[in-house]
Amino acid sequence: MGHIKLTNVAKSFGSIDVLHEINLEIADSEFVVFVGPSGCGKSTLLRIIAGLEKPTGGELAIDGKVVNSVPAADRGLAMVFQSYALYPHMSVRQNLAFGLENTKMPTAEITERIGEAARMLEIERYLDRRPGQLSGGQRQRVAIGRAIVRRPVAFLLDEPLSNLDAELRGSTRAEIAALHSRLSATMIYVTHDQVEAMTLADRIVVLRAGRIEQIGTPMELYNSPTNRFVAGFIGSPHMNFLEGTVESSSSGKAVATFAGGHRLDLPVDDASVATGSRVTLGVRPQHVSIGTGTEGISAKIKLVEALGSETIVHTDVAGQKILVVAPGQHDLAPGADIRLSLSAAPLHLFNEKGLRLEHAL
Amino acid sequence: MSRAVEFLFRRKGGKGWHWTDIVTWVWLVGGLFIMFGPAVWLVGSSFKSPAALAEFPPTILPYVTQKATVEAYDKPLDLYEVTLEDGSKATLAEVRRIGVVSQMVDPVKPGEIVKVNIANRTPVRQMSFAAENYTEPFTHFDFVRYLWNSVFVTVTATLITLVVNSMAAFALSKYEFRGRTFAMLLILATLMVPLSVIMVPLYSIVSVLGLFNNLWGVILPTVATPTGVFILRQYMLTIPDELIDAARMDKASEWQIYWRIILPLTAPALAVLAIFSVVWRWNDFLWPLIVLSRKELYTLQVGLSIYSGELNVQWHFILAMTVVTMIPVVLVFLFLQRFITTGIAGTGLK
């Protein structure tokens, strides 16, 4: 049980609107990730669901019941905070027990639940220590443990991995995924790290400036971003964009001229774009290939980053930066001229407003 | 020892005397005398007999003139070091003094009177501690009763101060409400109102409440202190709000958040305020003097004023009892000075 529905939820602090008309439905035992740049309102949205902030408009329902005026503690949710927010003056055991004691739960059951959570998270050895005596990773586990013992209908996680080092982040990410499949509870996870979003989520909600830009599975977001922002935000390194103008064509396929005078066939028919309108062509760095001979777009190499398994080439095409990720190792030097080929690439096309133009094919 | 000397004589740049070195030295040594002089004089003088206190010039340490019991004289006589006319020195006892001539007698040969000019004699003095300055008040003066009153007022007032001020500080630091800053400024503004201004209205309130001649009349008006609210609020602002959010998610009531989360985490600031409060309440004089008029309710500070009568001030008892009343405060400073200095550093308070 952990079905959460938001209808037209809005939030403003004074005259500043931080969330506009958020509509979102989260199914039971779904793993949803809110992702977006800092200041996009994703943490505020999570705090509204938690009950720590009151929405200034709209309706929030958990399992079909409107909970707008239900206090945080009675919503049956548990939250893991970015700073862990462990009570520094209490032992780990007391930290885990605090929430249960407040519900007047019998001591025997509290002990049992703490034991179970401690076993699951392997923190049994630290139960009598204070948070100050634990490492970052251990504190993280305690923070998750404090949520688990509550047996909530949904877990809310606010950037839980951002205070861990890179290595620990990877392993904890896997543990959270394992925990989700074991508990099969609804989880809402806030992050600005798209790798976490892609690997953990059943569905990703991309937010920008208080609005939902797109909701979809990680692959939907990657393969068909609905607008330029999502296209640029999801994927690493981010998508290349080429600005161009649509030209008249006779073949039935739209053609556009891009910087440097390159003419490219667009992946839409000419009826869907007006002649003379400006369009943006998006292509992922992984899909650009280094061409041979005189075919393709001429580019100048600015920087080469060789990672061994792949090579990231920063190039300049008539003033526009194009990144290329070529698998394997390449003997390239900055300053050299190369040819880039887009022939095999899945192309994304966005209109002047940055909205995706659907492929006709 | 050599390190202490090196520390004391350390100079700017390590060589030569810069004028700032001299100013610093004079300033610090002068400060040392100004701060410690009265305290040392107080402790020394508290052991003096009334006669020694009246002496001029005063001494730091308690000296008395030695006395000797001489045959044929009822009272013990004062002993003097005398330079005789032939230049020899002797220790003689003074029988009486007429003008500039003192009639003296040798304690060994009591029959023979020697006349000596008073310029040629100096009293034989020895250190003597008049312990009765301390012991007598305990028997005559109701010291234990006053001590109990003082302890009761200090402890109760401090406990209530901590609770009341921390509650105000909690609200002013952790709740968002309209006029929060204004409320804080208003509380701080009361720092500028001296006791003498509010004394009369305060007296009528205490009197209407029936707390006149009651220790609670001393305690209650003092418990809400702007300084205390300020110290605690500034400290509570440093406690992360996420802890409170976490406690709310953990179904803690607002009272539990205050009592189980905020108060334990504010302990260092509470310790500082407790120290200040103990010192303030212990040293309070004017307000208890106004509220308490029955002798058995006096606090120590008020009780001390008994010794300054209209006609006669018993300085030796006042001084001795002042030393006794200082002891708790001195102990507080000795053992808790670490907290006090951090508290002062943290709040910029005197």
Image: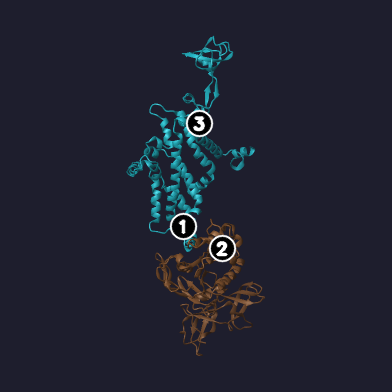
Chain colours: A brown, B cyan
Mark toward the viewer: 1 or 2: 1
Residue B97 spot, x, y in % from top left:
48, 14
Task: Give the residue pinned by disc 1.
Answer: B256
Residue B65 spot, x, y in % from top left:
52, 21
- Estimate how packed mark 3 is, as few (under 14), some (14 to 19) or many (20 or more) residues with alpha carbons within 10 Å: some
Q: Nearer the viewer, residue B328 or A74?
A: A74
Task: Give the residue pinned by disc 3.
Answer: B41
Q: CA distance from mark 1 to mark 2?
A: 21 Å
Mark toward the viewer: 3 or 1: 1
As helix, strand or loop, the secondary structure at mark 2 comes to: helix
Q: Which mark is residue B24?
A: none
Residue B143 image-quadrant placement: top left
- Estimate how packed mark 1 is, as few (under 14), some (14 to 19) or many (20 or more) residues with alpha carbons within 10 Å: some
Label 2: chain?
A
- The amino acid sitting under disc 1 is Gln
Is any part of residue A233 visible from this angle?
Answer: yes
Residue at left 57%, top 66%?
A: A116
- Estimate how packed mark 2 is, as few (under 14), some (14 to 19) or many (20 or more) residues with alpha carbons within 10 Å: many
As helix, strand or loop, the secondary structure at mark 3 comes to: helix
Please determine whether, in this image, residue B137 is positioned above or below residue A176: above
- The amino acid sitting under disc 3 is Trp
Label 1: chain?
B
| Residue found at the very far bottom of the displayed protein | A251
Q: Nearer the viewer, residue B185 or B218?
A: B218
Residue B190 vs residue B331: left or right? left
Q: Which mark is residue A142?
A: 2
- The amino acid sitting under disc 2 is Val
Label 3: chain?
B
As helix, strand or loop, the secondary structure at mark 1 comes to: helix
Residue A126 image-quadrant placement: bottom right
Q: In terms of sequence position, does the residue under pointer 3 or pointer 1 come before the other?
A: 3
Q: Are marks 3 and 1 on the same chain?
A: yes
